[in-house]
Image: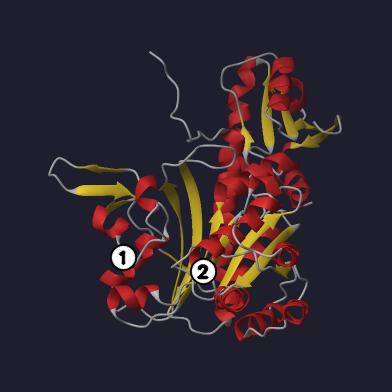
């Protein structure tokens, strides 16, 4: 039997799973601070929902969607993102409080070419505001993302921002004869194609660098293109009020055609641009009106959890799994080790204890192998004096301390 996982999916090792927990837990904590509440929707959707023109970002999604007929003959599929389920949910629950602010994390599925940092099964973590008209919501979403990336140790992130109405206006003025949809697709992939390929689509060489550039402020952008965009100007005002500084404006950010209507965002980590965008989103003000015939402007942002995880792995930002290894010697000291460990667990100090006895040397080797920082040695002679040995495995230093002092000593070190 060939026991191998499918192409384009991944298992998560201990370290990777710990990072997933950290990303999810940090996200939940921050989302709730900003007034977002959890929503959990089904991974299975009716095929009509997944392929409805008004709820997805394009016809090509049909080819990327895992779908099948169940035993009852119903055509169903696995969600390709979390937004389509949000739209369906709102359509079914039109009595929800507006604005409806939700966060959600879950796996999504896309049958597409599997390659580096692009998976067929992967985690997404979304925040959306449905029914929020003010551009301040756009800024808040970026403020939430900004705080999350900082909290995860990814402070070198940059939000690239554009506006769909602005890019459409520029194309109408500079390239009225070009097919607008095709032109925007070309602009959207300008960093992935050569200059020659870009120019072949009908663009002028003088505008190549313009579309490639990243501007440090709205004022710098508007002066360069001699155009005004009220939404971008207002967005920058709110971003400054909310303390968000990691942003630039760029005309190359286009996002889903036929879906986004205003401000759009892409997020990159400096030094890891090859991983791709680690978060994206924007305004989609017309989707709900098309579906439920009720005007509900909306803005959302999706975190590429697996890509964030990949970057954190490369940065070595792996949280500790256990803080303390409780070792014991000789074997009959196991019961005393269990009692001491019980007190540590009561005080929420993560511990590891191997009930299958090994020599003290091998217990220490196991602790080092598991990247555990602290070691408590419960020894027969020490316990006669009501003491244990506390060893710092990183520094190689140890000391004898009273059993009653273990909690206070480890607790103080945990806060550092």
**Residue depicted at 42% across the width and 19% down the height:** 3
Residue shown at the point (61%, 79%) measured from the top left: 173
Label 2 neighbour load within 10 Å: few <14, some 14-19, many 20+: some
**Quadrant of the rendered structure where residue 383 is?**
top right
User: If the image is split into quadrants, where does the N terminus sit?
Assistant: top left
Q: Which residue is mark 1?
A: 88
Q: Is residue 287 visible?
A: yes
* Residue 302 image label: none
331 and 53: which one is in front?
Answer: 53
Residue at the image point whose x is 55% and y is 64% from the top: 184
In the rendered structure, which disc, 2 or 1, sits on the residue that comes first in sequence?
Answer: 1
* Residue situated in front as seen by the camera: 139 or 250: 250
Left or right of 397? Residue 78 is left
Residue 407 relative to residue 202: left or right? right
Decide if residue 284 is on the left or right side of residue 408: left
- What residue appears at the point 65 percent right and 69 percent down from the top-left corner? 161
SS of the residue at dot 2?
helix
Residue 319 visible somewhere in the drawing: no
Give the image's coloring scheme.
secondary structure
Residue that mark 2 sits on: 180
Label 1 secondary element = helix
* Of 33 and 146, the residue lying toward us: 146
How far separated are the C-alphas under marks 2 and 1? 29 Å
- Residue 296 lies, in percent from the top left, at 39, 80
Q: Position of residue 143 (x, y in %)?
A: 64, 71
Residue 44, horizontal then vertical, whole percent: 30, 50
Q: Is residue 93 above or below residue 384?
A: below
Q: Tag 1: Cα neighbours inside 10 Å, few (<14), some, or many (≥20)?
A: some
Q: Is residue 288 above or below residue 229?
A: above
Between 310 and 295, the one nearer to me in the picture? 295
| Location of residue 408 in the rendering, given as x and y in whole percent from the top left corner | 74, 48
């Amino acid at each position: 039997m060939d026991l191998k996982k499918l192409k384009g999916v991944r298992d998560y090792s201990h370290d990777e799973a710990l990072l997933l927990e950290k990303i999810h837990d940090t996200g939940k904590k921050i989302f709730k601070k900003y007034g977002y509440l959890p929503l959990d929707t089904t991974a299975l959707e009716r095929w009509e929902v997944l392929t409805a023109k008004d709820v997805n970002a394009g016809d090509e999604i049909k080819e990327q969607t895992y779908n099948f007929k169940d035993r009852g003959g119903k055509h169903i599929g696995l969600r390709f993102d979390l937004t389509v389920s949000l739209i369906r949910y709102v359509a079914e629950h039109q009595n929800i409080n507006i604005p409806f602010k939700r966060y959600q994390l879950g796996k999504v599925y896309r049958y597409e070419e599997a390659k580096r940092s692009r998976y067929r099964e992967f985690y997404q973590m979304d925040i959306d505001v449905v029914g929020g008209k003010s551009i301040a919501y756009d800024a808040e979403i970026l403020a939430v993302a900004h705080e999350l990336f900082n909290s995860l140790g990814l402070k070198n992130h940059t939000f690239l921002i554009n506006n769909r109405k602005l890019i459409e206006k520029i194309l109408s003025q500079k390239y009225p004869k070009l097919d607008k949809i095709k032109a925007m697709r070309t602009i959207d992939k300008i960093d992935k194609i050569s200059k020659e390929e870009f120019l072949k689509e009908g663009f002028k060489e003088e505008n190549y660098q313009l579309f490639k550039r990243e501007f440090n402020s709205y004022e710098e952008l508007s002066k360069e293109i001699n155009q005004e965009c009220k939404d971008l100007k207002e967005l920058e005002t709110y971003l400054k009020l909310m303390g968000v500084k990691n942003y630039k404006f760029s005309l190359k950010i286009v996002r889903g055609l036929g879906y986004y209507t205003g401000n759009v965002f892409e997020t990159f980590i400096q030094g890891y641009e090859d991983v791709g965008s680690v978060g994206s989103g924007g305004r989609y003000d017309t989707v709900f009106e098309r579906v439920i015939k009720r005007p509900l402007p909306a803005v959302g942002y999706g975190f590429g959890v697996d890509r964030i995880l990949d970057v954190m792995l490369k940065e070595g930002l792996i949280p500790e799994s256990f803080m303390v290894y409780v070792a014991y010697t000789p074997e009959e000291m196991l019961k005393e080790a269990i009692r001491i460990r019980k007190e540590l667990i009561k005080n929420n100090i993560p511990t590891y204890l191997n009930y299958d006895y090994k020599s003290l040397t091998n217990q220490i080797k196991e602790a080092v192998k598991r990247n555990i920082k602290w070691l408590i040695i419960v020894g027969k002679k020490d316990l006669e004096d009501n003491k244990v040995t506390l060893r710092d495995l990183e520094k190689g230093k140890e000391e004898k301390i009273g059993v009653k002092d273990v909690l206070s000593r480890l607790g103080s070190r945990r806060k550092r």
